[in-house]
Image (cartoon, grey):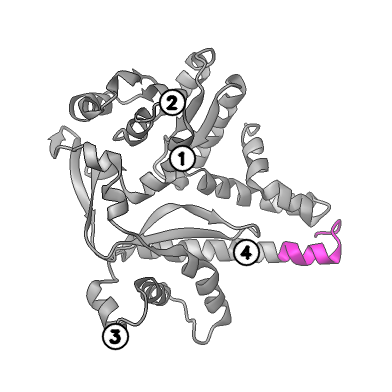
């Protein structure tokens, strides 16, 4: 194996393989904690560890989280490296003010109603509850760092439930991960996936945005949105909602519409998004004037990156070639060609 590589490149590739394993180990540890024990850290626990208030809350939280995820940072060198390389940059204390002053939070009120299988309501994060608050940090050496946030007080957010399961919510993660697309769009915009209308609302506030076409196939979702949320949009005249399958619309209706920007948000998270992402990437060829943005694209590209890793490392002739193949720009191009 690696017969085409120089010895120094072989060492770098082996380091890459170890980074892939560390990425996976960190991801699984945090998934286990977030899915099963997100509220284990409490104010009482924080205070008991930091009774004199000498340490910052982020420092205390980091120490508690690493221990609760099973890392032995005292006697295990690999665990200590995982803690410092992944957990330390992952943990961030968030401030409620920066979110409650968001225009959507200030101006849109979600009624607490139940209609058939659907329910609109407010949910909450408890003080010090852990959650993912943004997309992955991908470092130059391909370390992939999840971003774990917490508030030190209760935080309420709007949510839509389908059959009592969360279908969509406006949490810090949605706000942060949609911001690059919100910042970029102008002119004629199309968005795939309606949700609670966060992206559409934020885009509609921009003077440079002329129109927003929302493509959503679920008519119940559309009706609830039109009844409870759209009337609260200051610039609802910019918004058009089309009941259509996203991929069918993108393939058959979108070419020729001359959209300037497209935002695609069709998946619940990275675990169910890669296939749909790859399918939509092919449409870009037919819409050369449209700039596409994809929700949590870095997480989706991570899935693709490590799928091709073994093939790439087996056939490449240098580490630089491998590094190029694993980079986000190359993966975006590759994604448009996969059948």
N-terminal label among 4 and 1:
4
Q: Is residue 178 left or right of residue 289?
A: left
Can residue 52 be spotted in the picture? Answer: yes
Q: Any mark on residue 208, and which?
A: 2
Give the residues in magenta.
1-14
Q: Quadrant of the N terminus?
A: bottom right
Tell me how far mark 3 sits from mark 4, CA to CA: 37 Å
Task: Give the labeled residue for mark 3.
Answer: 52
Where does residue 195 sit, x and y in percent of width and height? 32, 34
Helix, strand or loop for disc 3: loop
Where does residue 272 sit, x and y in percent of width and height? 45, 43
Tell me how far mark 1 sits from mark 3, CA to CA: 42 Å
Tell me how far mark 2 sits from mark 1, CA to CA: 21 Å
Task: Give the labeled residue for mark 4.
Answer: 19
N-terminal label among 1 and 3:
3
Vertically, is 62 above or below 224?
below
Q: Is residue 13 magenta?
A: yes
């Amino acid at each position: 194996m690696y017969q085409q590589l120089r010895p120094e490149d072989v060492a770098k590739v082996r380091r890459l393989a170890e980074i892939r394993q560390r990425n996976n180990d960190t991801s699984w540890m945090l998934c286990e904690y977030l899915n099963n024990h997100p509220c284990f850290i409490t104010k009482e626990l924080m205070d008991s560890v930091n009774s004199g208030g000498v340490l910052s809350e982020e420092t205390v939280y980091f120490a508690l989280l690493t221990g609760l995820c099973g890392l032995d940072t005292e006697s295990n060198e690999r665990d200590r490296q995982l803690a410092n390389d992944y957990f330390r940059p992952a943990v961030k204390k968030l401030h409620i003010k920066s979110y409650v002053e968001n225009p959507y939070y200030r101006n849109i009120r979600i009624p607490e109603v139940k209609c058939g299988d659907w329910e609109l309501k407010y949910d909450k994060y408890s003080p010090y509850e852990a959650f993912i608050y943004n997309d992955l940090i991908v470092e130059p050496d391909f370390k992939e760092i999840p971003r774990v946030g917490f508030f030190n007080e209760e935080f309420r957010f709007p949510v839509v439930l389908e059959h009592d399961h969360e279908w969509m919510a406006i949490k810090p993660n949605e706000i942060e991960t949609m911001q690059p697309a919100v910042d970029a769009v102008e002119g004629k915009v199309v968005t795939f996936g309606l949700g609670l209308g966060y992206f559409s609302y934020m885009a509609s506030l921009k003077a440079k945005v002329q129109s927003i076409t929302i493509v959503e196939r679920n008519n119940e979702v559309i009706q609830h949105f039109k009844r409870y949320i759209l009337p609260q949009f200051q610039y609802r005249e910019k918004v058009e909602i089309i009941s259509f399958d996203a991929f069918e619309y993108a393939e058959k209706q979108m070419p020729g519409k001359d959209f300037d920007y497209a935002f695609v948000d069709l998946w619940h998270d990275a675990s169910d998004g890669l296939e749909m992402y790859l399918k939509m990437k092919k449409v870009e060829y037919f819409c050369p004037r449209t700039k596409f943005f994809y929700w949590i694209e870095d997480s989706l590209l991570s899935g693709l990156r490590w799928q091709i890793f073994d093939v790439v490392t087996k056939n490449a002739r240098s580490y630089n070639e491998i590094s190029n193949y694993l980079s986000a720009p190359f993966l975006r191009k590759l994604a448009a060609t996969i059948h």
